[in-house]
Image (cartoon, rainbow, N blue to C red):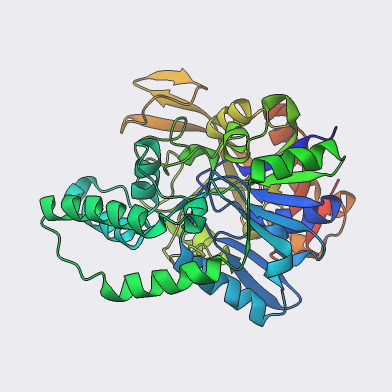
Amino acid sequence: MKKVDVILGLQWGDEGKGKVVDVLTPNYEVVARFQGGPNAGHTLEFGGEKYVLRSIPSGIFQGGKTNIIGGGVVLDAILFRAEAEELAKSGHDLTRQLAISKKAHLILPTHRILDAALEAAKGSAKIGTTGKGIGPTYTDKVSRSGMRVGDLLSPDFERIYAAAKARHERMLRSLNYEYDITELERQWFEAVEYLKRFRILDSEYFINEALTEGKSVLAEGAQGTLLDVDFGSYPFVTSSNTVCAGACTGLGVAPKNIGEVYGIFKAYCTRVGSGPFPTELFDETGDALCRIGHEFGAVTGRKRRCGWLDLVALKYSIMINGVTQLIMMKSDVMNDFETIRVATAYEIGGERTEHFPYTITDDLRPVYTDFEGWRCDLRGCRSYDEFPEAFRRYVEFIERETGVPVKIISVGPDRAETIVR
């Protein structure tokens, strides 16, 4: 029996998971997204074209693969339709390649409005959500009042929807939030009919039967470990389990059936929205990382905060996920830097620690180790041996510190600019 390999982010999201899934997919027959919603954009570039995926697994670009939106995902029918139709225009036939779990929860029009209303009510304490309705949908899920994709096939569909809408409208009245749902609701019902064209199935049975038949399965996560609702920098987190365990709960896979765990990280750090960021840079170096790395959200367009690589946080993420292979992205962004820094410990209240703390306070100070920059264009390299010695020292230091091999190194946005060791 085969095992499910898992690929996930180790930082605050935006690590480049989409490109890596696309690179790895030729080795797999099934690619399944296990959590998150359309706030997580995966950007892929190849053949001179750029694609942004929000809910659809990144394996969709490799023909002959089955792609599954798993039960741990929350799905917005409007945004799904727009994404699917855009892919269809570029020649990708999703109706044969894509299936959707009955247990995936639906983002309703009122979820989006609730998201905006609740964020506005927080004032200066706002989380910095994308406003896509993710949090309210997961709230309904855990309060046992959610609406799922399987409900679209029920004769009670309209009753279930009306009850959910009425409940949300009572909440909106209590928040004194003004809104007009008419157009959004019209689009949603049209998109729901479009959604029904796709194969809606019990994905947990499909995946486990695939494993029994000896088929290879890759589970794809969204966001990053440090945004996990349980183990991230709470409360500035997403609403789902972004860690490896989320693949088990989001797809219905037993822990014993998890194989390789690919952990993706950038050669530096970024974060979108509010929340702590120990190595954030507020100087010209931070601006350079943002400018050279094109650090703007794939879905929202929001500017990403940038900083040095944080090994304290990275080692924490590796521990939580049981990472077996590391994948380093965007190494080329620092091609021209004279000095590159890595945080190897924190000082908190005058005491040094290598543990990621329960809460990140204002008195936390990163302890840095400095490296000589490699000062050359890594994008021209096509093997590890071609990398300059300074860059190899950087990679091998990370391997020694984490105890996990860096197996894949990305030196550019195109799928061809990927070095496999």
| Residue sitting at the far top | 351
Residue 390 is at least partly visible in this image: no
Q: Nearer the viewer, residue 281 or 86?
A: 86
Residue 13 is at least partly visible in this image: yes
Residue visible at 74% across and 29% down in the picture: 257
Q: In which quarter of the image is the N terminus?
A: top right
Q: Which of 205 and 126 is in front in this view?
A: 205
State the image coordinates of residue 355 (x, y, percent, origin top left): 50, 22
239 with respect to 60 (left or right)? left
Residue visible at 63% across and 35% down in the picture: 252
Q: Which of the 4 image quarters holds residue 204? A: top right
Q: Is residue 229 above or below residue 128?
A: above
Q: In which quarter of the image is the C terminus?
A: top right
State the image coordinates of residue 375 (x, y, percent, origin top left): 70, 57
State the image coordinates of residue 68 (x, y, percent, origin top left): 66, 53
Count of numbered marks: 0
Residue visible at 19% across and 67% down in the picture: 179
Q: Nearer the viewer, residue 355 or 127?
A: 127
Q: Is residue 376 above or below residue 368?
A: below
26 with respect to 297 (left or right)? right
Residue visible at 40% across and 44% down in the picture: 138
| Residue sitting at the far bottom | 89
State the image coordinates of residue 95 (x, y, percent, origin top left): 68, 68
